[in-house]
Image (spheres, rainbow, N blue to C red):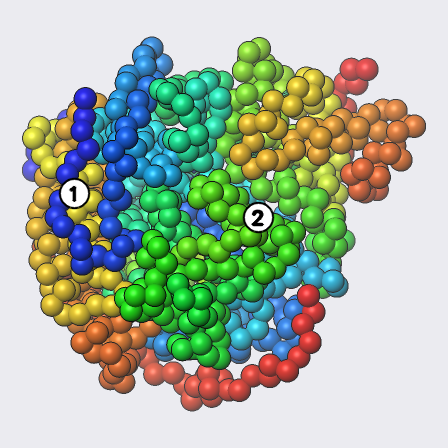
Amino acid sequence: MAVRSEVAEPVDDVPLHLREAEATGRSVTLKVWRGDPTGGELVSYEVPAQEGMVILDAVLWIQAHVDADLAVRWNCKAAKCGSCSAEINGFPRLMCKSRLDSFQGDITVTPMHTFPVIRDLVTDVSWNYEVNKQIPPFSPSEEDLKDPEPWRMQQEDVQRLTEFRKCIECFLCQDVCHVLRNHEQKDQYYGPRFMIRTATLEMHPKDSLDRRPMLKHKAGLGMCNITKCCYEVCPEHINITDNAIIPLKERVADEYFDPVRWAARKLTGDKRGRRPVRGMEDAPDQR
Amino acid sequence: MAEPAVNYDEVSTDVLVIGAGGAGMRGAIAAAQAGCRVQVVCKSLLGKAHTVMAEGGMAAALANVAKPDSWKTHFSDTMKGGKLLNNWRMAEIHAKEAPERVQELERWGAIFDRNAKGLIHQRSFGGHTYPRLAHIGDRTGLELIRSLQDKLVHSPGVDVHMEVTVTRLLVRDGRVCGALAYRRQDGGLVVYRAGAVLLASGGLGKIYRVTSNSWESTGDGTALAYHAGAILQDCEMVQFHPTGMIWPPGVRGLLVTEGVRGEGGLLRNSQGERFMEKYDPERMELSTRDVVARSINQEVLEGRGTPHGGAFLDISHKPADFIKSKLPSMWEQFHELADVDITKEPMEVAPTIHYAMSGVRVEPATGASNLAGLFAAGEVACGLHGANRLGGNSLSDLLVFGKRAGDAAAAFAQAGHKAVSWESGQLSEAIAYTLRPLTGEDGENPYQVHAELQDALTRHAPIIREEKGLRVGLGKVKELQERAARVAVASGGGRHFNPGWHASLDVQSMVDNAEALFVSAIERRESRGAHTRSDYPEPDEELGKVNFVVEKDGRELKLDAIAKEPIPDELMEVINSKWNTDYTRED
Ligand SMILES: Cc1cc2nc3c(=O)[nH]c(=O)nc-3n(C[C@H](O)[C@H](O)[C@H](O)COP(=O)(O)OP(=O)(O)OC[C@H]3O[C@@H](n4cnc5c(N)ncnc54)[C@H](O)[C@@H]3O)c2cc1C
Ligand code: SF4
Ligand code: SF4
Ligand code: FES
């Protein structure tokens, strides 16, 4: 098994914080799933541990020192881009946000289960991009669009949305949601990420569309039975169920059952005079 | 050269946009709105570009928090911050148009924090006379990316190819008319034929060991442009951000947003002194980045560094709720990755490579390069920021010049510049270059060459530079260039999502960028902005009147000095104006 490469030359003239990091002397066994759509297996690697090392560091160490072709998707290594999603000991996580020292014993790293494997830790997440395109985008009213003055909105109204706007599209919630993961009902439910997306649009003070028919029918809001698994894995700690899905469910109910209308409005800052989503007006009512 | 027997797909488009960061997406939207078919390609998935990491905000003289602000003050701040090496025309356009671009983004769905009047709130940042940065918490880049992404995918005529990397531009008679790329997913090659090409590929931070930049920042765009015959400018000018994380090693370089200081964070050395008093008593922590980075460097050199060789940055005197609402990702970043609670204890920080002021030399108003049909915008383009970029000026740069370059590329493609074919032999050469690392059996390890390159830059082109070191560095880079030409994927693995192959091509871009940096840094025998020379500690008035440029001459890199267009008197007056700082903030 591989040993750590020597540090090339003495580094005394380089300031402390710029030196090559030193290994701690400990090492960790990483079992990484390697394979392609036809199949694969776990491969063990011995990785020298550094202080504060994250799983992604370990995977990149393997790339640089053992198997250059180990496929992994990453970008920022700062938990900001949502590229490095995988399952660590079976739990959906960002590899760049998972510290090696937070696990005991061997660590297993496998690709997200819900999406087709491309190679090794990389999966094909293009379905999510297709779903996103189906959600009617931000649509302010004609009046607001024509307004020559800068828009005014209150911090309070904006604040509610900031939680949702934190979403980095890591698709870990999509990975864990049993509707998509175990039942493979991708044709019936857009998944938690896109409930967040829709909630942002629905609660935007300047948006004028009504996406409730879409939520009820095409997006399959009713498929969610509030297990809250999505919230548990969200690296941005977005309270997907309590703050987005449940209010959306109430909002949809609001359309169909009048008595709760006032409650939903209070919860979610409903706006009047929304236009229904084009093409969804005549969607069959499945009540 | 024999035609390699390889298959490739061909795609025709009016405007090819290379890059889907802020600049690329804004440019693509502009070109689509002008009626063009637009093909966007990017190395990673859509919405993951480096821009997503931007934290602090985007600078625009909206005058929401500080009434006296105007484009003039913003222009003056930008020019002074850049030590007048900036292209003044770009600085003027930027200051005038940034407010409109920010408001436009809001009308496309972006959400910003508000002031009490319900207008976009603006925060203070280094080098800006007034609070000027529109922001949402400390994740403004994500907001910009997501808003543009949603606008882009709903723009008619736009197609996006994700995880596709361009390896060569294709040229005919000095006109860029296409590009060769590979798909990560299956390793297939794609040839793009385009009426115009907009380069928006971002920066080059990965040439240094300690950087805030993402994986993508390997200087591909500047290398592509250089090999096609474009002129690169100010290659010595790279910005060290004063505050990167330094502990634990795994997170070294990770950015600590300037927003921390903007919200009241204080810098102290190991003796507890607020050392900025010595270096810039007026602006203190909110001095420009070049000054703060050098000051921290100096404190460490003089033995007043923190245990891991940096400075303390402390915001814990502010209420915990305030910190968590204004700087949520910073709180989380330190809590999760460094076991530090920034509401209770100071952070340890030191300078990290952050931004390339250098890049493709462009026409100020259009982003046109010296090659017909090639436009550039965003971090890959050069001119707006001069010798030092002010925080927040990049995100507004992306919007202002992304739009302008997109408009200009569309106009070029529509002005009868139909797609043409490249010169014969070019494509087969480009294909051979792209596939070569897959064939070399006992070639160099790309990761090793990359590590040595980072070492050379880290040692020989640090914050404080001197001739001898720069020359040693250049020598090393030349050797590394030869080795980079022999990199190969030792473990094989084929073309199907093979990072070893990708790294082999990235490192070849990086060595060429490094050569341009060293050559230009040697030539600028003065200290100006981000470029500090211990052997020439003062600015030199004459050198302030020129930009150093490099281009490819045969196989060699050629350096030249180009005289800057003098700043008109009336703008010089603006730059030297006194600004009213006696006003009431409207937070
Ligand atoms: C941590 C951090 C915080 C920052 N905070 C701020 C801030 O608060 N305010 C501010 O103004 N600026 C900030 N900046 C700077 C700013 O974010 C960047 O300068 C800016 O985002 C660059 O945008 P861009 O569109 O030019 O390129 P990028 O966002 O870097 O995008 C480049 C695109 O080009 C693609 N690409 C590259 N090479 C190729 C190739 N060969 N083939 C195909 N595609 C390619 C990439 O995939 C990517 O899509 C920050 C930077 C960092 C690192
Ligand atoms: S709460 Fe709903 S969306 Fe979330 S995981 Fe459970 S079923 Fe899926
Ligand atoms: S909601 Fe959370 S888990 Fe889901 S994609 Fe967004 S950031 Fe990831
Ligand atoms: S690499 Fe960006 S989130 Fe992990």
Say if B170 sits above or below A184 in the image: below
Q: Which residue is drawn at 24% across and 46% down?
A: A20
| Secondary structure beneath label 1 | loop
Q: Name the residue under label 2.
A: B328
Residue B78 position within the rendered picture, expressed as x and y whole percent measured from the top left: 45, 73
Say if B288 sits above or below A260 in the image: below
* Residue B13 visible: no
Q: Residue at x 63, y 48 (%)?
A: B109
Q: Which residue is drawn at 64% across and 56% down?
A: B319
Q: Quadrant of residue B289?
A: bottom left
Q: Have a look at marks 1 and 2 and say if they share a chain.
A: no
Given residues B431 and B208, the one toward you in this image is B208
Residue projecting furthest to the right: A259
Amino acid on which disc 2 is placed: Pro
The image quadrant in which ligand 3 is located = top right
Residue B476 position within the rendered picture, expressed as x and y whole percent measured from the top left: 10, 54
| Secondary structure beneath label 2 | helix
Say if B516 sits above or below A180 in the image: below
